[in-house]
Image (cartoon, rainbow, N blue to C red):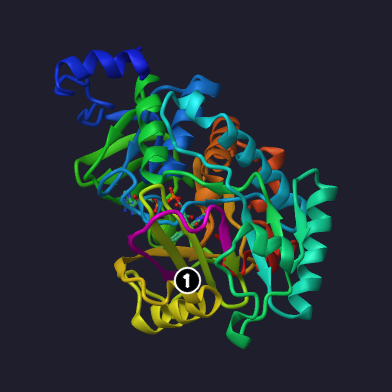
Amino acid sequence: MKSRYSIFSLMRNALSYHEKWPEAWRSPEPKSSYDVVIVGGGGHGLATAYYLAKIHGIRNVAVIERGWLGGGNTGRNTTIVRSNYLWDESAGLYEHAMKLWEGLSQELNYNVMFSQRGVMNLAHNQQDLRDIARRVNANRLNGIDSEFLTPHQIKDLVPIIDLRGNGRYPVLGASNQRRGGTARHDAVAWGYARRADEHGVHIIQECPVTGFEIENGRVTGVQTAKGLIKAKKVGVVVAGHASVVAEMAGLRLPVVSHPLQALVSEPVKPVIDTVVMSNAIHAYISQSDKGELVIGAGVDKYVGYGQRGSLPVTEETLAAICELFPSLKRMRMMRQWGGIVDTCPDASPIISKTPVEGFFINCGWGTGGFKATPGSGWVFADTIANDRPHPLNEAFSLERFNSGYLVDEHGAAAVAH
Ligand SMILES: Cc1cc2nc3c(=O)[nH]c(=O)nc-3n(C[C@H](O)[C@H](O)[C@H](O)COP(=O)(O)OP(=O)(O)OC[C@H]3O[C@@H](n4cnc5c(N)ncnc54)[C@H](O)[C@@H]3O)c2cc1C
């Protein structure tokens, strides 16, 4: 058992100038075999490993990451957390995640800085208003907090907004989820890694998976840069690289990978204490604890694996932000980056068994999987442990692309963060 992080451990370590903190997780050489190998050391993979060990008692588990923990989309996203999706299936999954978020710092003994500052979605025309009203009603029927805001209520919450949108993007109303907000992305990966390690999970970084051993339709091992690792079960959670890795097992996924970019401004004093999103103009904004404005866009339309985006998307997003928030026009942008998001035709994830026995896949979260991290790991662990989907992820199986029972969340997920 690791020593707990607390005010006392902080004071104790201050006496030694913080030079004696123990390592947060070990870096073991891989064993020759594991009960379960998780491919991908992002938040979802690490959460899966943690819940496999904690809830299902499966501790002989390795997480194999080709780079560093959280170096994929987990460490690149804009950290918006909400659960106000349209359909019952999505509401169940994302609200389960929301409830886990609400106790996550305590559960992990790691401050994930979950801040329930509210998430607002703006309506700029009559159709937006109708869509928002429908979603607010659907959310309420599912027991999820959701409210409709008038322009005056929006102005009260966000004084710097121009309700005329410079004539181009008039603000007619908004949906609002007060329990939504943001969290610290790296801390989520590190917190899960630390706790998983504590339960005996091996975390192996800088070790790309290059193929799979499959005998008689059943997975038996994982080929890696550090050699063959035998495994009774394999869970693949590699986000933007899902189709590439699945292809190594002979599977073709209904997933397309796009770059998605975000940017932050120079730090300023607090000017906005909620999250404002606009699906219609594909732009959203919040302010980090450091004071930087965190701004995001829609996907770059081309398919690609370079972790960067193109300038036209940045320009379009910033133009829209400036029209809605004219006082930000002279802000300087400090950093811009991109990640690769894996999108499904119905903008919903895949958390599923596959035609290869013992081989499970978790992907398709597209532009909005960070918010689901705890819930995704929780249901994926349950699915892997019990060889069948949990009721919360039953609707998100690969089978839906044959049956046609899609969970079309484009309306609630257009910009999907
Ligand atoms: C710019 C941007 C903004 C976003 N904003 C939001 C937001 O505000 N809210 C929200 O909910 N979501 C957001 N998202 C989406 C969110 O980041 C992802 O859905 C989520 O983080 C996916 O987590 P993950 O653990 O599945 O993937 P990742 O964190 O990408 O982890 C997958 C890991 O697999 C590893 N890997 C890949 N191939 C291999 C291999 N062959 N062998 C071993 N390891 C491999 C990668 O290195 C990576 O570390 C955003 C994404 C981006 C890019």
Please state which amino acid type lies under the numbered disc 1. Ala
Is the residue at mark 1 in contact range of ligand 1, meaning its CB lies under 8 Å from it?
yes
Q: Is residue 79 left or right of residue 275?
A: left
In front here: 135 or 64? 135
Left or right: residue 20 versus residue 60 is left
Crowd band around label 1 with a 10 angstrom C-alpha radius: few (<14), some (14–19), many (20+): many
Q: Position of residue 193 (x, y in %)?
A: 36, 32
Above/below status of 306 relative to 37: below
Task: Give the SS element for disc 1.
Answer: strand
Q: Position of residue 214 (x, y in %)?
A: 40, 46
Residue drawn at x 52%, y 31% is 104
Magenta-highlighted residues: 258-276
Residue under label 1: 297
Quadrant placement of the C terminus: bottom right
Residue 200 highlighted magenta (yes or no) = no
The x, y position of residue 349, in whole percent, is: 58, 56
List x then y, in percent, for residue 363: 51, 54
Residue that appears at 36% across and 29% down: 34
Note whether 9 is above or below 330 in the view shown: above
Q: How many marks?
A: 1
Residue lying at the far bottom in this picture: please name it.
167
Q: Tell me: residue 4, above or below residue 202.
A: above
Task: Find out whether residue 266 is within the magenta segment.
Answer: yes
Q: Looking at the image, can residue 41 be seen?
A: yes
Task: Kindly identify the residue that appears in the image at 68 percent across and 63 percent down.
Answer: 154
- The quadrant where ligand 1 appears is bottom left
The majority secondary structure of the magenta stretch comes to strand
Quarter of the rendering containing residue 98: top right
Q: Is residue 416 visible?
A: no
Q: Which sits in the foreground, 102 or 245?
A: 102
